[in-house]
Image (cartoon, grey):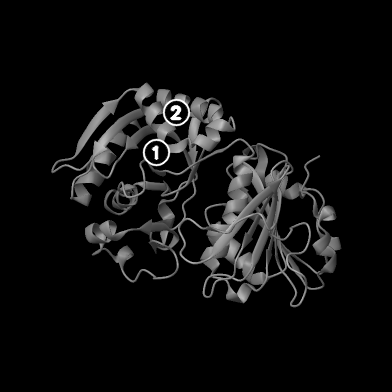
Amino acid sequence: MYTAERQRAQPYLDTISGPLYEQWYLLHHRMIRVVTNRAILAEQVRHFLYYAELLAEYCYDSAAQLAVDIPIDLLWQAGQRLYRPVAFTCYLFETRAGEAFPPPPAEPRPDDVAWEGITGVDGPLRARWKHGSLRYREYQPFTGVSSRISSVLDKTDLWATLYVEDVSKCASWFITRFVFYMLIGAMFGCDGYEIVHAAAIALDGAGALIAGSPGSGKSTLVLSCLHLSGMSHLADDVLFLAKDDGIVRIYAFPEDIGVRQGTSELLGHYEFMQNLENDARQKRVVAVQQYFGEQVVSSCPVRAMFFVHALQRSPEFRAERITPAQAVSWLMQEYISQQKAQEGEADYMFDIFSDMATQAHSYRIWLTPEAQVNAREVRALLLRHA
């Protein structure tokens, strides 16, 4: 049985009297199901997941009409592209004014859990805690960014519920990128995918992973390759890795590209860099869907890896071939935290990094002050391995 899942165990559905909006997506060989009581949240998710295949949308008068199983016509649409017979299910609810917040199955922040900053955003704070397979988050309200938000994720059964106290007070970019994505991304991470903070581009079906710490030049290089060399886009900051028939593939997360001052200095005269919004995000963002949407691809095998560093600059572009062992060592240093190693989560990453380093050609590269030169040379390197 292909299970759609779990609305029968979602008590908040019984309290909703208005319409319910349901969306079904196919993304990276997985089915994603979104259910919400607000049309604006459905629209925001649709815009955010523009690179996924929207299989169907439904509107129901009551929760009793929701499907228990994945509709058979959607299974036919997905066909062999669906690798797992379970839908990642995410409920997004705006709560009613005056009711206790958050409703079950979420829970209030325990007194011994501290508030913490959110990477990439100035202002709002969040708290994180867990019980067994359940992962909880609560977000403080912050003017112009968010109302109170609470979520719970089941890492075993792959469902999540997100409660928003007042959608009208929330920036769409905050709900989708910093709350909704954290739930969907975690489900991928619990179901065979490795989440890596890296950039990736592609050419003629060959993918290149670009690894480097913040400020190393990844975003500038990606934008240069997209605009000046016409290459394909997979990711700028976060991507998924998984093996398909033994081949390590990059699976896209083409969010808007955050840029720092250095990028503005090198590329500021191009149209896509004009009129960037100033908001609570720590970087100004380039709208990928608007300027590079037609260059987005869903996945590619990894055929090259480029390692960049803020100190690796040169008057002329340089590329130094490194061994698979060096590539794995650098990847492990960049992405494996002490906490992951202590929790035993590093073993699988070591395996996939080792396979990727064996299957891809790895380079340490020195970037020049000329964006067009960097884009041309990276294109030539990747074309060699396409």
- Secondary structure at badge 1 equals strand
Q: Which residue lies furthest to the front in this view?
A: 112
User: Observer-nearest residue: 337 or 94?
Assistant: 337
Query: Is residue 196 visible to the viewer in this orientation of the structure?
Result: yes
**What's under tag 1, amino acid-wise?**
Leu
Evaluate if marks 2 and 1 touch, with contact meaning CB atoms under 8 Å apart.
yes
Q: Quadrant of the C terminus?
A: top left
Q: Name the residue under label 1.
A: 209
Q: Which quarter of the picture shows residue 278?
A: bottom left
Q: Is residue 287 left or right of residue 34?
A: left
- Secondary structure at badge 2 equals helix
Q: What residue is rendered at 64% in x and 54% in y?
A: 113
Q: What residue is rendered at 29% in x and 41% in y?
A: 309
Q: In this view, does 180 lie to the left or right of 272?
A: right
User: Observer-nearest residue: 302 or 279?
Assistant: 279
x, y percent for residue 38: 69, 70
x, y percent for residue 193: 57, 37
User: Observer-nearest residue: 239 or 385?
Assistant: 239
Q: In which quarter of the image is the N terminus?
A: top right
User: Observer-nearest residue: 202 or 10?
Assistant: 10
Query: Mark on residue 356?
Result: 2
